[in-house]
């Protein structure tokens, strides 16, 4: 028996030891594989003379570099969709403008992507960079099989716009079609009670109405009119077409065939892609036997050093650019969210960093948790006492997004930025009817009148609703006071322009919520001026990338990510019905982000989307 136990014990130990050694060798091998990939020297992309810069509109463009870029996950799953930041795109276009080896830009709009995901404010910034490129005397050629408003808005700066003979052009104006859930909630027995301040606070309407309120319709119409007006003005200027003519086209011929598009002056040429390639070969002096023209893709060209062209900077003086992108949530928050605690720590760190001379807060957020917004705003206020804090508004900087912007030295926005929405609300769900219909019931024992006021087993009583309303009123008054103090406006005026109303960037400037019209780079230049840095500064971006490979192997590992990656096929709804289902999923997913400890939110209307 003793020998049996000894043999069994020895066998187990041997097996465990073997597994440990095997696992260690495997892990060590993987480690060395990653290190070798990470440290492999890359001479960088080669740029030949007379090259075209290819701007593929299917690229994923984001405000900030996502921190969830996990190398191991990409390698194992085969997913490789490396985004490029908006600022990097603009910087790359500026670099190409100064590079004598780049003779032009080819905008490839044959696949939807960046243009369909970005808001009009971001598209405006890219469009301005393209316009400067063209003004330098270099050519821009844009080609598509079908043009829609967003892609055409971006591409209309081109010298030559080409449409496939079988293609179509959509110029039918802008629309917003919110989805209302009140009927479904009622049908399935989900009760909804709302406490809010501000007659324009449309964020709660999907839960309590079956159509837009008159106030929400009014603000949505005004917002669409402002964005559409800027679209007609910008496109009309580039194409030398009166805005009124573009409006007439949208009202009478929303879908135009290729030849009609040319007749109307919307495109310059009707041709197939091979014909466009042939023209680009001539422009780049390519050999006629070459498969394509001399080119380099924008994502590759972005890695070409630009110091010799005056684009890159190197200085001990830092301008911190903080990207607040996504829903504002309580706590640390996940990737793609603005966690109150996490961003408070970022500003605390920046405030104490002597090398950081000025801060630019780039906001792309519909708002969210009122508590988290206040936590972030407090740190911004303290930071402003130590160094200038400039705000750059992206596509959306509304409600909680405006809350954190209010106490800054200066606010920049694009004409088509969505901002304002100074209002507060709370949504209280209960499942009393749903439970009753399915044979479920609750009973309660408590030691005080309001001990169970957080329950979802019943609707809130009038007395409980009064308590919630008192909290909402308090937060709303705090919001109003912060805007009044930060913007140096009378409280009465702020109260008049608040009420939860949404404004475009150009309208927000007229009423004093925004100081200047301009993009991210304009805000950065202003920050440098405020800190009296001259040209002696460089940008330092936050939040910093905190992926596993960054922590283990450092920044060099990013260079290896493309070695083992496989191109990701983008999935999108193949019909309109699936698109609506996807919209419903997005609406429901937003409820998961509602984690304010007091249940009070400063947020844009849930389903405000411009198509």
Image (cartoon, rainbow, N blue to C red):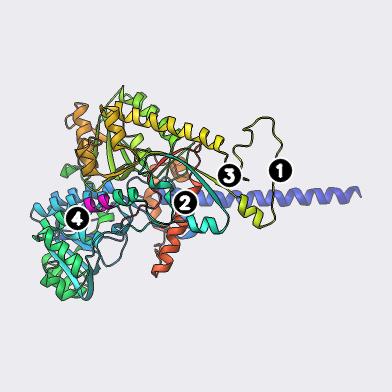
x and y, in percent, of residue 125 in the image: 22, 48
x and y, in percent, of residue 368 in the image: 42, 41
465 lies above or below 206: above
369 lies above or below 435: above
- Nearest to N terminus: mark 2 or mark 1: 2
The disc placed on residue 231 is: 4
Whether residue 139 is visible: no
Residues in magenta, as a range: 221-227
Q: Secondary structure at mark 1?
A: loop
Asked if the residue at tag 1 contacts the one at tag 2, i.e. Cβ–Cβ closer than 8 Å, the answer is: no
- Nearest to N terminus: mark 3 or mark 2: 2
The disc placed on residue 443 is: 1
Q: Nearer the viewer, residue 50 or 366?
A: 366
Q: Is residue 593 magenta?
A: no
Q: Within 10 Å of the Cα at label 2, are there few (<14), some (14-19), or many (20+) other Cα atoms?
A: many
Q: Secondary structure at mark 4?
A: helix
Mark 3 sits on what residue?
459
Instruction: Report the residue that reaches farthest toward the top.
Output: 385
Mark 3 vs mark 1, CA separation in Å = 14 Å
Residue in the picture at 24% in, 41% down: 520
Look at discs 4 and 3 and give the one toward the viewer. Answer: 3
Mark 2 sits on what residue?
207
Q: Secondary structure at mark 2?
A: helix
Q: Is residue 413 left or right of residue 552?
A: left
Look at discs 4 and 1 and give the one toward the viewer. Answer: 1
């Amino acid at each position: 028996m003793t020998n049996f136990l000894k043999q069994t014990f020895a066998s187990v130990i041997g097996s465990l030891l073997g597994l440990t050694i095997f696992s260690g060798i495997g892990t060590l091998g993987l480690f060395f594989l990653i290190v070798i990939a990470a440290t492999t020297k890359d001479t960088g992309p080669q740029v030949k003379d007379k090259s075209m810069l290819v701007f593929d509109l299917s690229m994923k463009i984001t405000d900030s570099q996502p921190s969830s870029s996990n190398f191991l996950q990409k390698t194992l799953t085969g997913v490789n969709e490396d985004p490029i930041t908006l600022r990097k795109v603009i910087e790359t276009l500026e670099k190409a403008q100064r590079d004598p080896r780049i003779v032009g830009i080819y905008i490839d709009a044959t696949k939807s992507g960046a243009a369909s995901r970005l808001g009009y404010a971001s598209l405006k910034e890219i469009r301005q960079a393209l316009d400067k490129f063209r003004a330098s005397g270099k050519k821009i050629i844009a080609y598509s099989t079908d043009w829609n408003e967003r892609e055409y808005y971006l591409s209309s700066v081109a010298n030559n716009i080409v449409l496939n003979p079988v293609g179509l052009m959509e110029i039918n104006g802008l629309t917003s079609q919110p989805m209302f859930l009140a009927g479904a909630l009622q049908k399935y027995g989900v009760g909804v009670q709302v406490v809010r301040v501000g007659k324009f606070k449309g964020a709660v309407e999907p839960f309590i109405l079956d159509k837009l309120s008159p106030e929400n319709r009014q603000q949505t119409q005004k917002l669409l009119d402002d964005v559409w007006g800027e679209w007609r003005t910008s496109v009309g200027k580039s194409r030398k077409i009166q805005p009124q003519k573009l409006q007439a086209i949208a009202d009478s011929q929303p879908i135009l065939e290729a030849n009609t598009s040319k007749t109307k002056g919307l495109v310059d040429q009707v041709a197939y892609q091979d014909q466009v390639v042939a023209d680009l070969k001539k422009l780049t002096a390519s050999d006629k036997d070459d498969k394509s023209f001399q080119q380099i893709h924008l994502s590759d060209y972005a890695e070409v050093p630009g110091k010799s062209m005056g684009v890159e900077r190197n200085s001990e003086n830092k301008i911190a650019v903080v990207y607040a992108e996504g829903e504002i949530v309580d706590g640390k928050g996940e990737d793609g969210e603005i966690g109150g605690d996490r961003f408070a720590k970022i500003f605390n760190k920046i405030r104490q960093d002597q090398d950081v001379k000025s801060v630019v807060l780039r906001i792309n957020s519909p708002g969210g948790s009122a508590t988290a917004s206040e936590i972030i705003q407090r740190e911004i206020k303290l930071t402003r006492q130590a160094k200038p804090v400039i705000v750059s508004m992206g596509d959306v900087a509304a409600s909680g997004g405006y809350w954190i912007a209010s106490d800054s030295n200066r606010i920049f926005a694009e004409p088509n930025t969505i901002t304002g929405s100074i209002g507060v609300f709370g949504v209280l769900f209960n499942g009393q009817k749903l439970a009753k219909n399915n044979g479920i019931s609750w009973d309660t024992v408590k030691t005080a009148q309001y001990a169970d006021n957080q329950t979802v087993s019943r609707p809130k009583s009038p007395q409980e609703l009064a308590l919630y309303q008192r909290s909402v009123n308090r937060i709303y008054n705090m919001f109003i006071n912060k805007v009044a103090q930060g913007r140096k406006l009378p409280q009465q005026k702020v109260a008049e322009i608040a009420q939860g109303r949404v404004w475009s960037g150009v309208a927000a400037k007229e009423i004093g919520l925004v100081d200047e019209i301009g993009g991210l780079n304009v805000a950065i230049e202003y920050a440098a001026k405020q800190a009296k840095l001259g040209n002696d500064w460089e940008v330092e971006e936050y939040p910093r990338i905190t992926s596993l490979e960054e922590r283990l192997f450092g920044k060099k590992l990013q260079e290896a990510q493309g070695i083992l990656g496989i191109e990701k096929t983008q999935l999108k709804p193949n019909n309109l019905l699936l698109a609506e289902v996807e919209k419903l999923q997005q609406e429901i997913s937003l409820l998961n982000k509602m984690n304010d400890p007091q249940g009070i939110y400063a947020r844009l209307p849930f389903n405000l989307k411009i198509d």
